[in-house]
Image (cartoon, rainbow, N blue to C red):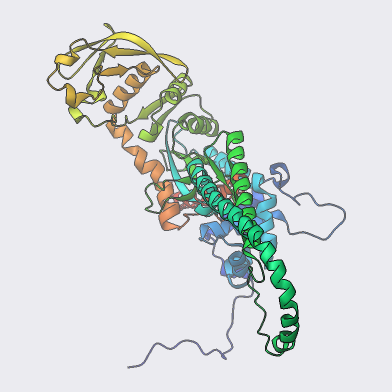
Amino acid sequence: MKYIVGADRNQISIMPDTLEDYVDENNICRVIDAFVESLNLVVLGFKHAKLSSTGRPPYHPAILLKLFIYGMLNRVRSSRRLQAEAIRNVEVMWLLNKLVPDDKTICNFRKDNKKAIVKVFKEFNKFCLTQDLFSRETVAVDGSKFRANNSRKNIYTREIVDKNLAEIERKLSIKVTEYLGELEKNDASEAAEDMLNINNIAHDRINQAIKVLNEPKPDVSPTAGKTPKQEMEEAIKELNIKKHELKNIIAEMDKAGENQHATNDSDSRLMIPGGDGRNFDARYNVQSVADVKHSLILDFDVTNGCNDKGQLKNMTDRAKDVMEVDSINALADTGYYDGDDIAACEENGITCFVTKPLSPGQAPKQLRADKFKYDKDLDVYLCPMKKIFERSHYQTIDGKQLPVYTCNSCFQCPVKNLCTKNPTGKQIIRNFNQDILDTVNKRTEENTELYKKRGQVVEHPFGTIKSVWGFRNFLCRGFEMVNAEMALTCLAYNFRRVFNIFNNNNKKLNFNT
């Protein structure tokens, strides 16, 4: 038995004469090439799309855009790795006409064209619309947290700053006390030292020659040759500098109206990771809206909000613009259950299907607020114990007067202690938009089959991008650069989906229609 034997490296062989022969007709590289060539890069705002009459010849932006799209499709995101692909990858050689831009040029292209790259993603979605790839009826919205190019140590919360300031104040108090004690000690010993110095002058001169002969290596430590007084002065100075820095951070937070301040990547924030199992860290919250027909990403938005609250209208409005419709159905999870946001959606032609979150509190499930039924005609609530809660007064919350419902029989109820810890009895505060929320709740419960599509549609892109492609963190920093990076990722996802859809139907993508 023998091993499988490869070709002899010294054997002369007949290789294809051109790069064209290495890339077959169905290769996705040809689709990338056709798509980029169909774009008007001048209108999109790409740098060097219009040549100047002077200066060194630049690379055509189409060349570098093709390289980035190919890299995202093949899980190659680093500028240095993209440069390496241009040297060793035959497909990239064909795509770039054997040009090899250096990693700095590749990196600068993304930085100089961050807004134009986002427009390319939108241009591809316009093509998808012309190909009837969107349902134009129902979308799903979700958010996912991606690791930022920043360390959690570079993000300060108000709690952390207050804690550090208290510790610095404590250390300053100790150092100042020690410093004052050292001054008193020095003042008491100055007179005695003056007398001793006169007697020691002769002794010092005698020993000088011996010290020169036996002098050890100099101490280069930061405290070498420093008196305790000087060391304390430097320590106090350093503590005051840190104190000043922390106070500046508080001023920045107050100015921005936020509870966090980040250095290195100022737009990232500390967030709870969600479902990917990673630690509490510096992240961005990426919002996405996908169409139910082929799970294509209609649009995205990179935010630094720690939750999804208030994002439903923002994302559904984007979906309406992409699909050029006036009304759609929107599927979302409990993170988007916000009265004002849902009300705004319903008023603007967006039919919401959002699951209601479980009522908070320590009461048993059968006694929680969601089990209290509202009678709109009588304007009362009926509790699980068949007691009536009538409107008793109003309470101001976030500038709105909200009605409060109470029951006169609450104190005689045998399960009061289980139902509420309020000594004045159970109170139900009716949301300002509760009528709309009740309608949405009923609609969602009655359309379970439609709502089940939410996870299948919008979580598919995030699952592919994170788990299959391994894209869990951003390489860039700041909203604009992170948006460009996410646009390339969403473009690559949609590109691969559309390519597969056409291939499965034995059709060819034509960007000239």
**Is residue 233 in view from this perspective?**
yes
Q: Quadrant of residue 292?
A: top left
Decide which of 377, 27 is in the foreground and name it.
Answer: 377
Farthest-out residue, right: 54
Return the x and y of residue 440 as percentages of the image width and height: 34, 23
Residue 149 image position (x, y, % from top left): 55, 54
The image position of residue 112, as x and y in percent, is 70, 51
Q: Work out whether 498 lies above or below 314.
A: below
Q: Is residue 221 left or right of residue 502?
A: right
Residue shown at the point (43%, 47%) measured from the top left: 461
392 left or right of 59 in image = left
| Residue displayed at 35% across by 43% down | 456
User: Measuring 54% from the left and 34% from the top, which residue is drawn there?
Assistant: 322
State the residue at coordinates (51%, 45%).
166
| Residue 253 screen position, x and y as percent | 58, 38
Where the N terminus falls, by quadrant? bottom left
